[in-house]
Amino acid sequence: MTEAESKLIVQYADSDVNSLALKLRDSDNVDSKFVLRQIAGRQIMRRKMPQWAENADLIYPPHLPLEQCSSFFTANYKKEIGERLLSSFDNCVDLTGGFGVDFFLMSKKFSNAVYVERNNALYDVVKHNFDVLHRTNAYFFNTDGVEFIKNTAQRFNLVFIDPARRNSAGKKTVCIEDCEPDILCFQDVLIQKADVVMIKLSPMIDIADIVAKLHNVREIHIVATANECKEVLVVLQKDYVSDPQIFTVNDHQRFSYSLYSERDCAVAFCQDSDLVGKYLFEPNASVMKSGAFKLISKAFAVNKLHVSSHLYVSNHDVCNFPGRRFFVEKIAQPKDFVGIGTANIAVRNFPEKADILKKKLKIKDGGNIYLFATTLYNGSKVLIQCKKVG
């Protein structure tokens, strides 16, 4: 990086990169594409990994590896999994190193950490950055991760792999076998060469698909932040044959259970609309993804409104409920809300979409009122008016 390039990166740190591209030109000391890439990279890292964005000596690759890399929160959560499950921290390996955020955080506690990346340019960038970050326990291999793990005689405490979720045409994929590499083809090799295997999968993947296709599944983690599912992590462990444990995570909200306990759990329903209760609870995105709709009712002593309405009620506030909490103000037919003005409408097991309801009721988005259009236990279609708790 030249001094001229460094100055431009600082000068235009907050600029719109697309607009800047129209006026920035190459010169003897300036590669404009490089400068634009660094500005864009730092802007992405401000929200994903602020510690790195503050380091002026780091170099950023093209856009896609940055968009695909983990945030500090999701990478640090992976580190927490490893620290909880492992008793030894001699060595670990990341077989699909990428931009190295996951590797950087997960490998901190290990004596020796191996980074494997087959993309030459990305490998060079990450190796440079780890030198800048003074990580002395890292060893780098510019090769294919599958070939590395198949051919190495070494056994690792932790093996991590994040298969690419795009096909040859660049379209996003979800199923395990459609990712690259296909984990199903060599999962037994991974299990044999690690105390713990951790696999990062699409947030859209079906949990049942994971259990059906992968061997020795010990844990499944559904990781969300700001109520948006970001990834699903699967932990494999040799000889593990018990019920997989499911962990739902949404920032500080955590809820865990054994997979098959949901199937056998009894749920309490609110069977009288006059007894809905003072409080309404909406599970967060990771709980919704997990499908633990009966266990949530039992674990937090809240009543479900309907078998297909994933909303819960109680006469008592439940401060640690994994989701949003509301104070119930009114329950009525949709027509009774015409002219309410502004409100936030959510549809849960209701025959009409939110946009149609807004038009019918002449409601604009916003304000402090929350309306849940839903179905009660007796089948009646109602709107529940609420205000947020806290």
Image (tube, grey):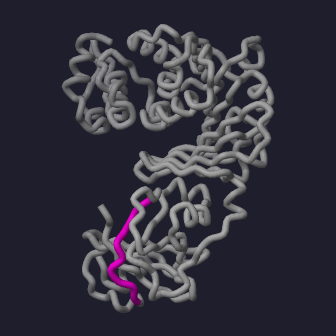
Q: Specify start and end residues of the magenta stretch as a single range.
A: 323-332
Q: Out of 285 and 111, give the one closest to the viewer.
A: 111
What main secondary structure does the magenta stretch of the protein show? strand
Residue 2 lies in the magenta-colored region: no
Give the total number of marks visible in the rendering.
Answer: 0
Is there any visible trace of residue 252 in the rendered image? yes
The quarter in which the N terminus is drawn is top left
Residue 65 at what x, y percent from top left?
Answer: 49, 31
Is there any visible trace of residue 118 in the rendered image? no
Q: Out of 341 and 29, give the one closest to the viewer.
A: 341
Quarter of the view holding residue 199: top right
Q: Name the residue at 39% across, 35% down.
A: 48
The quarter in which the C terminus is drawn is bottom left
Say left or right for 128 vs 39. Answer: right
Residue 308's place in the image compared with 68, above or below, is below
Residue 44 at what x, y percent from top left?
Answer: 36, 35
Q: Name the residue at 55% across, 16% down.
A: 110
Q: Name the residue at 66% across, 41% down.
A: 219
